[in-house]
Image (tube, rainbow, N blue to C red):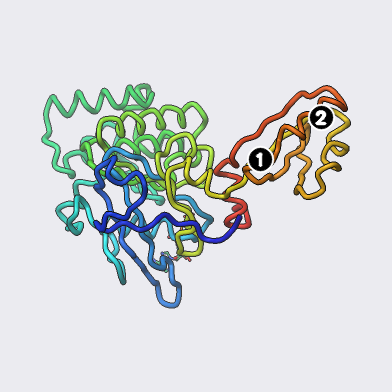
Amino acid sequence: MGGVSRITQHEGDGTGPPWVGRWDLVLEVAGVGKSFGDVQAVKGISFQVPAGKILGLVGPNGAGKTTTMRMILNIIGPDRGRVLWQGRPVTLGVSRTFGYLPEERGLYPRMTVREELRFFAQLHGVADGRQLDREIERWIDRVALTEHASKRVDELSKGNAQKVQFLVSLLHRPPLLVLDEPFAGLDPVNVRILKDVVRELAAGGTTVVFSSHRMDHVEELCDLVCLIDRGELRLEGTVDEVRQSTGEHLLRLEVPGHEEQVFSLFPELQVTHRGTYWEARIPRDFPTRRVLEEALRLGEVRRFEVAPPSLEDIYVHTVGRVD
Ligand code: ATP
C-alpha cells in the first residue's frame, strides 16, 4: 500500500474516471494550488463531482481541505488551476448560489433561531413571506429544533447552534452544498438526522462536498472520496474503488486460543492481534480457504471474514498516522 493512486484526471478529454459519462459532471477542480507565504497549503489538486453526488474530502489536520473548499466557493482565489461549475469558471454570482457550512461557524448570537434563518435566507435572495416561513418551520422540525426555535442563538447548545448553521447553508436550496466538518461535535442522533438530510438533498439533485476526519461517515455517506495529505491528492475515486485500490484484502480470524497456530502456517502474512480476533493483510488472490481449513481443524471458528480494507484502514496506511 502507500504510494499515490490517482484515477486519470478528466478535463473534457474523454479519458476520465470510469464513472464519467454515467453521471453529468458539475464541479471540476482542475489543478488548483494555493500558498500562504511559504506554506504550500494546496499543491495542484484535481477532482470532479457529478451532479447530485456526494464527495468526501478527507485528510489529516492541515492537509488543505478547508483551503480547497474555500477555493471552490470563490472565497479565496487559487494561485494556479481553476474551478469550473457546469463547465464555466465560478463567478461571484454563481458562488453566491452555493451553500457553505464553514469550519468557523458564523451566526449572529443575539438573533433567535427563526430570525437567523429568515435573515440568511433573505441574504441569499429568498423572498420573505409565508412560503419562507413554512420552509423555515419545516426545516426546524426536520432537524428537531422546534423546542429551541424561539431561543437566541447564544442560548443554544453547541450542537443545536451547529444545526442552525447547517440550515443556514441549505435554506436557499443551493445547487452545491459545501460542508466543512458538518458532523463534528454532534451526538449520534443528530449526526443521523443531518446525514439523512444530506442524502435527501443529493437525491434531489444537490451536489455535496464535505470534509471529515471520520472515515465511517465518509464510507456511509459518500459516492466519491478524495484523500488529501500535505496539500496533495493521494487517493481519489468511488468509495469502492478506493477500498479496492490497495490490491489487498483483510482476513479476520477468531479461533479462540489457536489463531497464532493457524497463522504460524502462513509466515508470509503480516498479522495483527485485534482484541478478540486476529487480522492479516492478504493479497487479493490469496488462498483463504487454506486458512479456514486449518482453523476448522484446530478449534471452534467464531469469525472468518475476508473483505477489502475499510476507508479508515486505507487512511491510516496512506497517511501513516491518525489525527
Ligand atoms: P483541518 O482538518 O485541521 O481543518 P485542513 O485540511 O482544512 O485542516 P487547511 O485549513 O486548508 O487544512 O490548511 C492547510 C495549510 O494551510 C495549513 O498548514 C494551514 O496552516 C495553512 N493555512 C490555511 N489558511 C491559511 C491562511 N489564511 N494563512 C496562512 N496559512 C494558512
Q: Amino acid at mark 2?
A: Ala
Q: Is residue 304 found left or right of 224 in the rendered image?
A: right
The CB of the residue at mark 1 lies under 8 Å from ligand 1: no
Residue 252 image offset from top left, x and y in percent: 71, 35
Q: Quadrant of residue 273?
A: top right
For image coordinates 78% across by 30% down, the residue present is 254
Q: Is residue 137 found left or right of 93 in the rendered image?
A: right
Q: Residues within 10 Å of mark 1 (few under 14, many from 20)?
A: some
When the figure is inspected, residue 293 is found, relative to residue 177, above or below; the finding is above
Residue 26 image offset from top left, x and y in percent: 24, 47
Q: Amino acid at mark 1?
A: Leu
Count numbered badges in the picture: 2
Q: CA distance from mark 2 to mark 1?
A: 16 Å
Element under label 1?
Answer: strand
For image coordinates 41% across by 65% down, the residue present is 42
For image coordinates 19% across by 46% down, the residue present is 97
Q: Where does label 1 land, which residue? A: 250
Q: Is residue 128 found left or right of 101 in the rendered image?
A: left
Is 134 in front, or is 316?
A: 316
Element under label 2?
Answer: helix
For image coordinates 13% across by 24% down, the residue present is 130
Q: Earlier in the sequence, mark 2 or mark 1?
A: 1
When the figure is inspected, residue 1 is found, relative to residue 298, above or below; the finding is below
Nearer to us: label 2 or label 1: 2
Residue 208 image offset from top left, x and y in percent: 33, 42
Q: Is residue 118 visible?
A: yes
When the figure is inspected, residue 112 is found, relative to residue 107, above or below; the finding is above
User: Looking at this rendering, what residue extends furthest in the bottom direction?
Assistant: 38
Q: Which mark is residue 295?
A: 2
When the figure is inspected, residue 13 is found, relative to residue 267, above or below; the finding is below
Q: Residues within 10 Å of mark 2 (few under 14, many from 20)?
A: many
Q: Is residue 137 found left or right of 289 in the rendered image?
A: left
